[in-house]
Amino acid sequence: MLIEMINGALAPAFFGILVAGAIVAIWMSLSPASSPRAITDRMTGMVDASGMGEELKTPFVQRMILPAFHRLTSFLAGLMPQKNIDKLNLMLIQAGSPGGLTAMDFVGIRFVLAAAAGVGYFVMMGRTDPFLVLIRNSLIAVFIGFMFPKLWLSQRIKKRKVEIRRALPDALDMLTIGVEAGLAFESALLRVGEQWDNALTEEFRRAVSELRVGVPRNEALRHMAERNGVPELTTFIAVLIQSNMLGMSIAQVLHTQSEQMRLKRRQMAEEQAHSATVKIVLVLVLFIFPAMFIVILGPVVPEIMTSLQKMAQ
């Protein structure tokens, strides 16, 4: 009798109570205990009332939700290998540090989104699906919610690399003009960063900031190549470092590299144009041709069926 009740209408409520209890237990175990001295000081009025007022003016999300979230993400990140944390930090840097997220924040978002997806599906479909089907689909929703942030991050990295690759030839032209006009290389980088606002110029401004705090030029350029992982940018920086070591003219190197980058960009555009024919064929076969066959052969099909029936009789 008890098993039938669990498999029946009480199953969604029972599972929801268990999930809610687990979340509350985890939050209570991770939240630090309040200091008895602080509580006694507040009760006796020893704490400054103005300080308490400023604290209460802070939004509830910043006072309670975000600290609890950071404690949870720190705990979850502590369970992961340091190698994975470093790789995730590099991916976030290559994506442009969206929202100022750290690796621990990203891990916490993945777990929270996975739990929200699973619980949300369970609550919404708890009265319609059978219990075993509900558990299976909830686990699928958990997997999708856990993998979605990583897919989003990968797409953002790919988009940013394409943006850097497209902006590099024009930026090298501007650098060449600035260096030939008498500007130093750092000043030319800064001028290009002020002229445009894209992913590449952000990296230029960051490299100039490193140079201003005393980082050697070659090291700052290597850092820029490592942060982005764009082959064209890495090649350009390697050539630039070698030219500095050999004492070659930076203006000539920039001019040569800008021509090569422009040629590569033209070749990439031609490659995408050639691949468009294959994509058009897929669209024609899957969408256009079936619609044409329905329009052309549709009126004839009833007559063909009638003729076949008469022949069969």
Image (cartoon, helix red, strand yellow):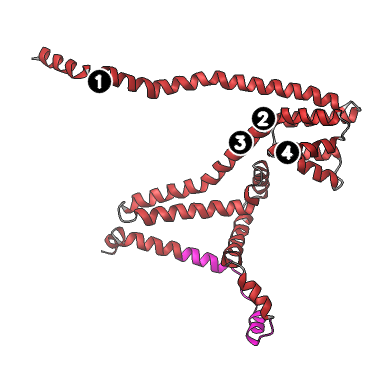
Choose between 282 and 300: the one closer to the eye. 300
Q: How many marks?
A: 4
State the SS at label 4: helix
Q: Against 188, is 273 above or below?
A: above
State which region is magenta.
21-47
Dot 1 crowding, Cα within 10 Å, few <14, some 14–19, many 20+: few
Q: Residue type at mark 3: give it.
A: Lys
Return the residue at label 2.
166
Q: Residue 5 appears at what percent x and percent y?
A: 28, 62
Q: Is residue 22 magenta?
A: yes
Q: Residue 238 appears at what percent x and percent y?
A: 80, 30
Q: Against 257, is 8 above or below?
A: below
Dot 2 crowding, Cα within 10 Å, few <14, some 14–19, many 20+: some
Distance in Å between CA atoms under marks 4 and 3 = 15 Å
- Tell me what residue is drawn at x 78 percent, y 24 percent: 257
Distance in Å between CA atoms under marks 3 and 2 = 11 Å
The mark nearer the N terminus, 4 or 2, is 2
User: Viewed as shown, does residue 264 lie left or right of 152?
Assistant: right
Return the residue at label 4.
201
Q: Is residue 231 magenta?
A: no
Distance in Å between CA atoms under marks 1 and 2 = 48 Å
Dot 3 crowding, Cα within 10 Å, few <14, some 14–19, many 20+: few
By secondary structure, the bulk of the magenta-drawn segment is best described as helix
